[in-house]
Image (cartoon, coloured by chain):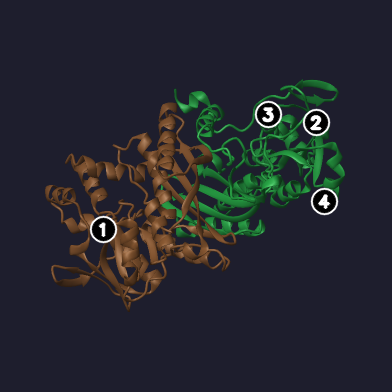
Chain colours: A green, B brown
């Protein structure tokens, strides 16, 4: 059975289950956006994310943007656990014929993204490889009681997202179809990890579960649902979407729904909280988040759109399909 | 200027210098085997090491051995800083046509190596890539005063290595020339990180500098020399070499010197200590290490062989040359 027959998600699920059995009870192993190691009063939160040129970057991506993105992808994972970043490492697989200047730009992209997130690049590794492959590791810490996990949502909790959704998908459509939606393109090529937002969520004490939305809202809702053993009602009309996304959808002849729910790349956070925590969160974060639904008993995830209720499809960005 | 024109070491040196300028003074950035982050009483030590199938693994390498090796390479880096491992992450770039069973074996190799080192695999990432690319991250902790760095050796300190050298090089010759030196082949394909030895060295209080020898003794001596700003005299006759290495050298028509000094892959530790610490180290480690030379003022690194003194060549395993 080849990986292409199974699909990334299923292959990964099987492997994660195997690894999870071996992890000691005080640490947090596979199943969340990052791992967490018990250091007494704090957890050390650590993520690793690999991006390969041919599979993960459009031809329009600059070397600076490749470096930026690998840092952002990892920072997004630890942000989803509520961690404050303390350092980054990046291993780089590089073709022999790469220009030194290009390597220099990759590193500058990593440094710039780290600086924006208030952390630093501490080292890495460079090796020969047949294409550019960048593997980042973001490290962070969070008080033990404040860590945000995918499990923890309970029926009645509100479901919310930071920022708006669909811009990265619109950027992808714009770049591949020449639609010139510059801001959307930039969101895709230079994603911002929600590092401050993650820390605000974790220290609020109001949040019951959290993850990032890098693989799309629909897959993320399903993941939160499975980890927390609740279902979700997502009100499509409440999902924050910018005008540019609707314009791109129209120009590309696509449904806005496909850009907003099933693509990903937005690097926003999806989280749940007790209704009584709404005021605390608003006072800390203002309008930096939007309530888009609610958790309920059961395992069903439904989408409410113009008064009609349908199943929220379990599809999104897949790496082996 | 392409990377192949510059060579890995020089390309890396330039990049490291760039990164080093941005690292805050309380952390330890590029220039050692791993990075270290100040967490108060302890350092968090973190390494990252990437291995790509075409460049780093012989065709005879099993998938289990690939997984084992990426774990060992990273554990060796944090062992060289004296850290106790607390967890491992591995990102895997995988071709679409890889068998699921092969992925499973890679993961089992990582798990087995982690278990041998007393630590655990906490998670990772899988992505599509054009060849198998494995990036590990080993995490460990060490008391701040006990950390081992490449800098710190002083004139008069003794230079020593753990274990014996040249077996991995002999294994490479055996595999590529069909010499059937099974034990040497196994050392190459299933390297053991000196995790316990690293911790014994760091807690002894006697060690003044340390690094691992994965790129060969000669390059490692030069690296320690540059970081500590001392020179070294290496007594070739004192370097511990097993009979199998000499036999393989003979069969392969090579000088033993080339296998012992200029190849690498042995994953031993190279370290310096004050002469008065010898008894402490012997009482803790017995004959698990061998004194092979001495630090002296200046920057020259010399090899003493059969009474003759020559420059210790600065060559070894190079990834882009």
Q: Which numbered disc flags the more N-terminal residue, 4 or 2?
A: 4
Q: Which numbered disc flags the more N-terminal residue, 3 or 4?
A: 3
Chain of the residue displaying label 4:
A
Disc number for residue B318: none
Dot 2 alpha-carbon crowd within 10 angstroms: few under 14, some 14 to 19, many 20 or more: many
Q: CA distance from mark 2 to mark 3?
A: 13 Å
Q: Which numbered disc flags the more N-terminal residue, 2 or 3?
A: 3
Q: Position of residue A43 (x, y in %)?
A: 62, 48
Count of numbered circles on the image: 4
The residue at 73%/27% (across/down) is A230
Identify the residue position indicated by label 1 in the image. Answer: B262
Dot 1 alpha-carbon crowd within 10 angstroms: few under 14, some 14 to 19, many 20 or more: many
User: Visible in this render: residue B132?
Assistant: no
Dot 3 alpha-carbon crowd within 10 angstroms: few under 14, some 14 to 19, many 20 or more: many
Q: CA distance from mark 3 to mark 4?
A: 28 Å
Tags 1 and 2 touching, CB below 8 Å: no
Identify the residue position indicated by label 4 in the image. Answer: A284
Q: Position of residue A286 (x, y in %)?
A: 84, 49
Of residue A23 and residue A253, the one placed in the foreground of this image is A23
Q: Quadrant of the C terminus of chain B?
A: bottom left
* A147 left or right of A60 in image: right
Chain of the residue displaying label 3:
A
Identify the residue position indicated by label 2 in the image. Answer: A294
Tag 1 and tag 2 share a subunit: no
Chain of the residue displaying label 2:
A
Q: Position of residue A235 (x, y in %)?
A: 81, 30
* A145 left or right of A12 in image: right
């Amino acid at each position: 059975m080849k990986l292409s027959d199974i699909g990334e998600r299923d292959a990964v699920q099987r492997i994660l289950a195997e690894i999870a059995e071996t992890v000691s009870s005080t640490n947090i192993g596979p199943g969340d956006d990052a791992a967490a190691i018990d250091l007494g009063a704090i957890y050390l939160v650590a993520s690793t994310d690999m991006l390969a040129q041919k599979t993960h970057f459009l031809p329009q991506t600059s070397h600076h943007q490749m470096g930026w993105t690998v840092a952002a992808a990892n920072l997004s994972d630890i942000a989803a656990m509520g961690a404050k970043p303390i350092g980054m490492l990046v291993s780089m697989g590089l073709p022999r014929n790469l220009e030194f200047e290009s390597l220099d730009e990759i590193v500058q992209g990593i440094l710039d993204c780290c600086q924006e997130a208030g952390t630093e690049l501490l080292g890495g590794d460079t090796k020969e490889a047949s294409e550019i492959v960048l593997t980042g590791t973001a490290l962070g810490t969070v008080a033990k009681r404040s860590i945000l996990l995918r499990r923890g949502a309970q029926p009645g909790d509100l479901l919310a997202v930071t920022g708006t959704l669909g811009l990265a998908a619109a950027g992808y459509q714009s770049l591949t179809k020449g639609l010139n939606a510059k801001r959307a393109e930039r969101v895709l090529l230079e994603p911002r990890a929600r590092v401050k937002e993650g820390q605000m969520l974790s220290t609020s004490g109001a949040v019951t579960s959290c993850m990032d939305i890098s693989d799309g809202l629909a897959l993320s809702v399903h993941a939160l649902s499975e980890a927390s053993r609740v279902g979700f009602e997502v009100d499509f009309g409440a999902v924050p979407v910018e005008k540019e996304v609707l314009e791109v959808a129209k120009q590309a002849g696509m449904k806005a729904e496909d850009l907003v729910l099933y693509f990903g790349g937005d690097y926003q956070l999806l989280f749940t909280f007790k209704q009584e925590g709404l005021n605390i969160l608003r006072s800390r974060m203002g309008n930096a988040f939007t309530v888009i639904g609610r958790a309920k008993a059961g395992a069903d995830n439904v989408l409410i759109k113009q008064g009609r209720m349908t199943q929220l499809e379990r599809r999104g960005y897949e790496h082996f399909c």
